[in-house]
Structure formats: structure tokens, C-alpha cells
Image (cartoon, grey):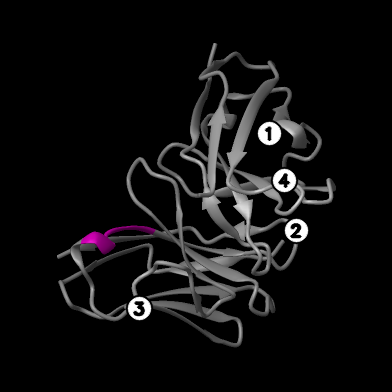
Amino acid sequence: QVQLEESGPGLMQPSETLSLTCTVSGFSLTSNGVGWVRQPLGKGLVWMGTIWAGGSTNYNSAVQSRLSISRDTSKSQVFLKMNSLQPEDTGTYYCARQGVYYGLFDYWGQGVMVTVSS
Amino acid sequence: DIQMTQSPASLSASLEEIVTITCQASQDIGNWLAWYQQKPGKSPQLLIHSATRLADGIPSRFSGSRSGTQYSLKISRLQVEDTGIYYCLQRYSNPWTFGGGTKLELK
């Protein structure tokens, strides 16, 4: 079945670069895109960016200058890198599969909590 | 950016009651809309895609509708397990945006 699992460090310092990995199973990264969504503690969901099945990317302009999404299809992994971290980047980071219907997210990982604090 | 104005922000309803949550898009987004349910400490779960289509495995008491740029999620007979926070998502244009969420509780 379709599964996504995020991994990465839980605690980061301001100005550092965050690196997260989303490992997927049950589908191919060359068939479906994968996106990243952030949720500050107790707040709503914010789409950050997506890497499509063909390898192209789209980013939210709010974080585009700091964000990079890439993948290794042989390992079924998608990577998020975001530099110049600030405390407001604290939250749970989810990766989610883009489904066949309008590319809407249909499966989500369990999320990884990232805290940015000195 | 397309704004998705979701209402109400919170809602308390009784078992078996009909519940409706709406998202007003700031411009036309066609059927590029989904609804999600999120329970505490869990990731969102897809309920409705393409504005009106029920996702696989979702009970038929959930339904989605569209009238112009207003989108609605209806729960026909509220059950205990339906409590949580509901979000809409538009994927019509970048940046894709979620509604602010509706917290649904049992009365």
C-alpha cells in the first residue's frame, strides 16, 4: 500500500539549513509527484513546494528563495532543503503524494516535528 | 494569491446532526479543490477530491458540492469519529492554499 515517511533532525538552530527526507513505498516517484506541507504548532496547513513525476518543481513564493526540493528515484526518496531557518519555521513537516485527480494530495506521511531555537 | 475563506472557524454539533462547512474562493478555481480531515496528532486524510468526488474508503455521509466559487463539505449524519479539524485546499494556482480550518466538536 501507499506509504510515505518523513525523517530528519528535530532541533535546529537559527540560520542553519534544514534537510528532510521523505521515503515512499507503494508507488513510483516517476508516476506521482510529492509535495511538502508545513503546519506550525496549533495552526493551519501551508503548502511549501512539490516535485512532479517528471522531475520539475513548483515552490510557494513565500519560501522559494530558501527552499529546494529534489529526489532520488532509485531510492524512492524526496528531499527538502531549506536554508536560513528562523524560529517561525518551527512546525510539523509533512510530505504528501499528488494524486491522479487534479494532483490533489491523496496520501500523507505521519509528519516530522522540527523546532528552530537557539 | 487565491484566498480560501473557510467558515465557520469552529462548530459544535450533536450526533446525527447535519453539518456543513464552506470555503469561499477569492476567484474561480474550477474543481481544483479537496477537503481533508485532521485528527489531533495525525496527518490530514483526504475526504473529497475534485470538489465533489468522494475519496476511496470515505463514508458516504460525507459529500462535497460547489456553487460558483463557494465550496461546501456536508456531513449528513454526524458521528463521534467525525470530530477533528477540516481543511479545504485549492490547487488551481500557485501558491496552492488551504482554508483556515474548521474545528468540529460534538455537543
Q: Which residue is mark 3?
A: B60
User: Measuring 63% from the left and 27% from the top, which residue is drawn there?
Assistant: A20
User: Measuring 85% from the left and 48% from the top, which residue is drawn there?
Assistant: A56
Q: Are marks 1 and 4 in contact (CB under 8 Å)?
A: no
Host chain of mark 4: A
State the extent of the magenta-drawn residues as a range. B81-85
- Residue in front for this viewpoint, A115 or A58: A58
Q: Write down the quadrant of residue A89 in the picture.
A: top right
- Mark toward the viewer: 4 or 2: 4
Spatial CA span between label 2 and label 3: 31 Å
Residue B107 horizontal side relative to residue B90, left or right: left
Above or below residue B93? Residue A44 is: above
Spatial CA span between label 2 and label 1: 24 Å
Mark 2 or mark 3, which has the lower sequence index?
Answer: 3
Q: Are marks 2 and 1 in contact (CB under 8 Å)?
A: no
Host chain of mark 2: B
Q: Amino acid at mark 4?
A: Leu
Is A2 part of what is drawn in magenta?
no
Spatial CA span between label 4 and label 3: 31 Å
Q: Which residue is mark 4?
A: A29
- Residue in front for this viewpoint, B35 or A84: B35
Q: Amino acid at mark 1?
A: Gln
Is B82 part of what is drawn in magenta?
yes
User: Measuring 20% from the left and 78% from the top, which residue is drawn there?
Assistant: B17
Q: Which residue is mark 1?
A: A77
Q: Is residue A2 visible?
A: yes
Q: Which x, y percent locates residue A83?
A: 73, 24
SS of the residue at dot 4?
Answer: loop
- Mark toward the viewer: 2 or 1: 1
The lab-note entry on whether marks 3 and 1 share a chain reads no
Number of disc labels: 4
Q: Which residue is mark 2?
A: B94
